[in-house]
């Protein structure tokens, strides 16, 4: 009998092709994630779960799956939707997909940064609205990117890839991270600064930290008040790092100039969110890793983690290796 696997949404075929020969798979085919009741129902008796960041995987889900559950494999690098401590307590390894999405996410961070600085979304709307009547010396002005100061919060893989790109724009790059990285400071020419200095000195601030207790609403009224009036804030990490009400106040009152978000709190952003009434914000629907190649690699990696777990082997990319001790 093949092991049973529940996959919480359709993923790229590259991943399914790996799984089909070894597991009996059930895919939740809807566009939206399984509602809680369906999730609790579908996981019953499975050996493996392949999850997305939209699924809340807590002890109730693990208990609903029962003693058969051997592995949880998340198709994302972030895993704040999973109660990892609860998985560890049950000796269930949790996999994720680091590395393969680093460059793609850094590219998208830059797409947002450039779009915000040079007001590309507003420009496109302007053209489509029939407002383009002539060349104008003061039309849609924005700040220069080259030579500006970029502040990076979280210098992990993605933060570093963003910093590397900044060097091509002759930017000064400063950073704050949970850990200091002296070798990277040398190789990438980046400076470690206190958070308050980062806020005060950056023209662009880009967030690349995981969401956890110490980063939840890190960007609040007090942090925003320390930023330059011309500051542009970019978030491709997790929505919960920014207090959305504080961001709305800061953008509305022009305490900072612009924000470009790929992630929001909550997701999706409610259509009645006051943030959507502002012109000085761009909001993308959490697509930073959405290149064709990268989504295939993420699906493949998630399948490989899952298969290893089903076979009782060590997951190639495990977030809780303590389960093997
Ligand atoms: C996407 O947000 C991811 O964590 O991979």
Image (spheres, helix red, strand yellow):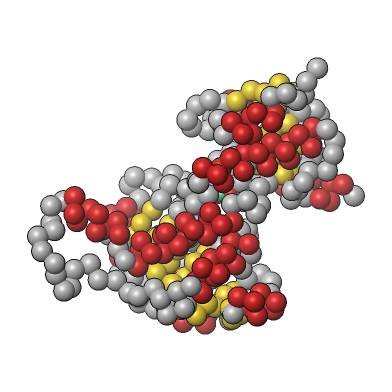
Above or below for 260 versus 44: below
Along the line of sight, which residue is nearer the eye, 73 or 148?
A: 148
Q: Is residue 29 left or right of residue 275?
A: right
Q: Which residue extends farthest right? A: 325
Question: Quarter of the image holding residue 275?
Answer: bottom left
Q: Residue at x 59, y 52 (%)?
A: 101
Q: Of 106 and 226, which appears nearest the observer? A: 106
Residue 113, visible in the rendered structure: yes
105 vs 142, left or right, is right
- Which residue is painted at 29% across and 71% down in the image? 142
Residue 55: horizontal and vertical position, in percent?
59, 38
Observer-nearest of 276 and 177: 177
Q: Eyeballing the image, is 138 above or below 244?
A: below
Q: Position of residue 85 (x, y in %)?
A: 75, 48
Q: Considering depth in this image, is 70 or 41 the residue closer to the camera? A: 70
Judge left or right: residue 56 versus residue 1. left
Residue drawn at 66 percent across, 70 percent down: 178
The quadrant in which residue 175 appears is bottom right
Residue 69 locus on image (x, y percent): 77, 31
Quadrant that contains the N terminus: top right
Q: Position of residue 228 (x, y in %)?
A: 39, 78
């Amino acid at each position: 009998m093949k092991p049973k696997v529940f996959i919480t949404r359709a993923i790229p075929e590259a991943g399914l092709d790996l799984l089909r020969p070894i597991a009996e798979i059930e895919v939740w085919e809807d566009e939206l994630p399984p509602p809680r009741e369906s999730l609790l129902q579908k996981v019953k008796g499975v050996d493996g779960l392949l999850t997305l960041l939209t699924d809340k995987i807590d002890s109730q889900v693990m208990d609903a799956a029962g003693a058969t559950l051997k592995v949880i494999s998340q198709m994302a690098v972030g895993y704040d939707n999973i109660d990892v401590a609860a998985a560890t307590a049950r000796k269930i390894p949790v996999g994720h997909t680091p590395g393969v999405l680093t460059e793609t996410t850094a590219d998208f961070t830059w797409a947002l940064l450039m779009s915000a600085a040079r007001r590309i979304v507003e420009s496109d709307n302007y053209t489509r609205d029939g407002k383009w009547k002539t060349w104008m010396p003061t039309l849609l002005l924005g700040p220069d990117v080259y030579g500006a100061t970029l502040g990076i919060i979280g210098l992990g893989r993605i933060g570093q890839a963003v910093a590397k790109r900044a060097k091509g724009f002759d930017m000064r790059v400063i950073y704050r991270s949970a850990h200091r990285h002296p070798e990277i400071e040398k190789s990438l020419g980046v400076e470690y600064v206190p958070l308050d200095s980062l806020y005060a000195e950056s023209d662009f601030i880009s967030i690349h930290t995981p969401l956890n207790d110490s980063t939840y609403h890190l960007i609040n009224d007090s942090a925003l008040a320390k930023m330059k009036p011309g500051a542009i804030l970019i978030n491709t990490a997790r929505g919960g790092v920014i207090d959305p009400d504080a961001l709305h106040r800061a953008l509305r009152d022009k305490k900072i100039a612009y924000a470009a978000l790929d992630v929001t709190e909550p997701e999706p952003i409610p259509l009645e969110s006051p943030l959507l009434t502002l012109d000085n914000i761009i909001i993308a629907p959490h697509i930073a890793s959405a290149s064709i190649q990268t989504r295939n690699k993420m699906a493949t990696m998630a399948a490989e983690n899952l298969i290893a777990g089903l076979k009782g082997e060590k997951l190639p990319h495990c977030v809780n290796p303590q389960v093997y001790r």
